[in-house]
Every structure is written in structure tokens, then in C-alpha cells.
Amino acid sequence: MSRPKKPRLLEERSDTHVGGGDNAVIERSSATVDDLSAEMKAIIFGYFGPTEIMCLRCVCKKWREAAKKTIVPQAPFSVSTIDTYNAMRVMTRAIPNLQRLSILFQIFDDGEDPNIREAYKTARYTSHDIQIISRFSKLRSLDLFQASMNGRYPFLFTSFPLLQKLGIGLCDYLKFDLAMLAGFPLLKELEISHSPFITGKINSLRVLKDTLEKVHIESCLVRGNFMELADFPHMRELHLIDVAVTGDVRDIGENDFPHLEQLSLPKGVVGGTDHKFLRISDVPEVMQAIYRLKDRVLSYYEWDSLRLSLSDQSPDWYDDCISSELQLHPPFSVELVQAGARHGWRWYGRSYTGTMSHSCVGTASCENWLDPEPDRESSDYENYEQKLHQLEQEVNFYRGYLQPPTEEEYNRICRGFIDRS
């Protein structure tokens, strides 16, 4: 029986023209896949994902060499089981040019300066060598989610000079300082959340000023003033949540954050989510700044529920009036309101009289509006009037007050209601 022929790159009858003009010589090509260089095979392999490339490399020695040279496309490869960890171990040698890697739920060897209590608790578990991923020197994207990593792992910040995206979430005992991110000079996206031993100053990110496009830092020991990032030319998203970052939205100028599309700020920033004001007099100016910011930024985090209020440390603060007939909270919370296309804000509190609950808010007058009143001839005016009427119907105890009453006025309001009951 004759042996099967090798696969050909060209059809049996395909011709190759050599020379030029009328005297061109025609030769039949007999090239096969095996005649391609390792570099050419590597280019072809680059159209497949990591799992497929691992299969292709099993064909022969030449294909194994080509797989080693292949720049693996950024198809996801996740390590979440013992089997996938063992596969990754092989891949560090077989296809070292992997570009995207996610590691989930695995237990790894302790790093430097581990948490002693956690190290003792996990001592009986089988752990794995995390440092083998340093062989993937061309990584562009690395995600660590709920990876049991205890301590510091310096190699993470010296092995991946081409890294563009770093994600770390729920890594309870992983330790590093933001200054170590200087080891990623091409980093574009940084996402860190719920990892309490990740620390540092926000200005450590300035070494990445010309590359960073997206920053999400949540529930980490990060501090500093968010305005340190105001001149980042490519920043599109900035989310700072439950961190010790400070600042003031009134400091944001027209030329700051020139390409920002999404913004979240913590309570330590004046005007950030859950911020508590120290002075009632600060609120109007801050609300104007927030509104200007919303007009510029496509998505200002929880615009409709920023949960702003007066701090109980404020000299303007006083205690609630609570009796058997009435539980009346002072209007120390701030909410944004809208009537048609017109935006505004008001102070509000809650009152409880018997089984009834009433919203107690300052009247929605022009002094608390952020937009001008729509023209009476405009198509939106009827809708504006209807919504304005609804807002005014919600006003109860504090009708006529554009800001919280003084303590004396508040006590008089409470006594008046009790006397009428």
C-alpha cells in the first residue's frame, strides 16, 4: 500500500510563475506545511486559543517548537482547579508567550512576611507554586480573584513588563504597596477590590500617568487626594470606593480629567458618596459643583442617591425630638430632585406620627434649583409644573425652609405639632 502524500499548501495543479514578460517560466509548486519555517507556523498558530495550541503542539517536534514561539492571542485561560493548574504548569514551558491569565480560588505557597494566623490555618492544605507564572513574560492581562496568597510576592511586579491590565479581588492576605506598580510601565487598567492588605498613596500612580485609562480601587488601605490624578490625559474611568482618599469636588477645574467618562468618589471627598458635611453653609456650593460634574461626566456614581448628609460632628447639628406622639428627625439629609428637565436639591428628614410616615423636606424653590425654569412656551413646561406640584405636596413640617432650621426653630416646630395633637 502506498504511503499517504503530505498535505500541500497549493492545489496539485496550481502554478507558480518565475521570471517576467512573455518568457515567464511556469513551475509547479510542491511545498507542504512541513516546509514552512517555525516562525511562519507560529503566526498561523496565533489564530488559535491556548487550548487549541496545546493540541497542535502534539503533532510533531517541529510543531512543538512553533508553539513555543507563538504569541498566544488574548483568549482567556482560567486556573480554578487542580487540573487547570497542572495544565498551566505545562504551558509555562510549552507556550510561554501566553498573554492573558486568570487565577481563581487556588491555594499557593506563602510569600514574604505572611500573616502568621492565616499561615497556621492553611498549613495542612496542599499549596502550589505561584512563581511559575513568571515564565509568562509576555502577559498583557492578569487577574487574581479569591486566590489564597499570603504575604508579599515581589516577582509579580518584576516579571511582566508588557502588562496592560491587572485585576485583584478578594485576596484577603495578599500584600503590596501601590508604588510597586511602577514595574508595569504599560499598565492601562487597574482594578483592585476587597483586599485589605493592599496599601499605598494614590500619588504612587503618577508614574503611570501617560498610560492609565481605568482605575477601580475599592475597600483597600489607599489614601491621598484624588486630585493627584486630575492631569492624567487618558483616564476614562475612576472609581475610588470605601478608601481613605480625600479631596473636594469643588477643586475640579474645566481642564481636569479631560477625558473622564465615569467617576465614583468616597465619603472622604467633599461631594463624594455618603459624604457628611461639617457646615450647612458648604452645601449649596458643593451641589453646584456636583451638578457641573454630572454635566461633564457621562456617569457620576449614584447621581440620584449620593446619600449626602450633615455630620453629627458639625456645630450645626442637634438631637432629634422624640416623644410618644412624634418622632421628628431634623432635615439633615440632602437629596437631588428633578421636575421635568430641571434639576435641584433639598434638605429632608423623616417623621413618624403614630403609624404614619411623612417626608419632611425644604420647599423646592428656585433658590435650590440648579437649572433655570423652563420657558412657559416650551414643550417641557407642563411636565415641569406637574412634577413641581408633586414635590411641593411632599413638604410637610419644614415648609418654607430652604435649609435646616436652627435648633430653636426646630424645637418650636416639634412643640407646635405636639400641642395640636
Image (spheres, rainbow, N blue to C red):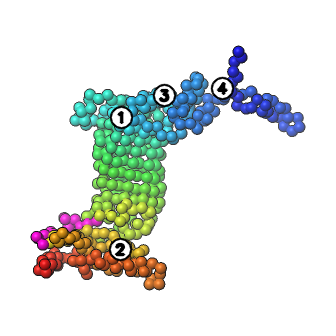
For residue 18, above or below residue 327: above
Q: Quadrant of the C terminus?
A: bottom left
Question: How many numbered marks are there?
Answer: 4
Q: Secondary structure at mark 4?
A: helix
The percent coordinates of residue 299 (x first, y second) are: 42, 61
For disc 4, the marked residue is 34
The percent coordinates of residue 61 (x first, y second) are: 58, 23
Q: Secondary structure at mark 1?
A: loop
For residue 421, above or below residue 333: below
Q: Amino acid at mark 1?
A: Gln
For disc 3, the marked residue is 93
Q: Secondary structure at mark 2?
A: strand
The Cα atoms of the two marked residues, 1 and 3, are separated by: 21 Å
Answer with the quarter of the image where residue 240 lies: bottom left
Q: Is residue 41 visible?
A: yes
For disc 2, the marked residue is 344
Q: Is residue 183 visible?
A: no
For residue 191, above or below residue 373: above
Dot 4: within a 10 Å radius of its alpha carbon, few (fewer than 14), some, or many (20 or more) residues?
Answer: some
The magenta segment: 308-325
> Is the residue under label 1 in contact with that under label 2 (CB below 8 Å)?
no
> Is the residue under label 4 in contact with that under label 1 (CB below 8 Å)?
no
Q: N-terminal of the two: label 1 or label 4?
A: 4
For disc 1, the marked residue is 106
Q: N-terminal of the two: label 3 or label 2?
A: 3
Answer with the quarter of the image where residue 148 lies: top left
> Is the residue under label 3 in contact with that under label 1 (CB below 8 Å)?
no
Q: Amino acid at mark 4?
A: Asp
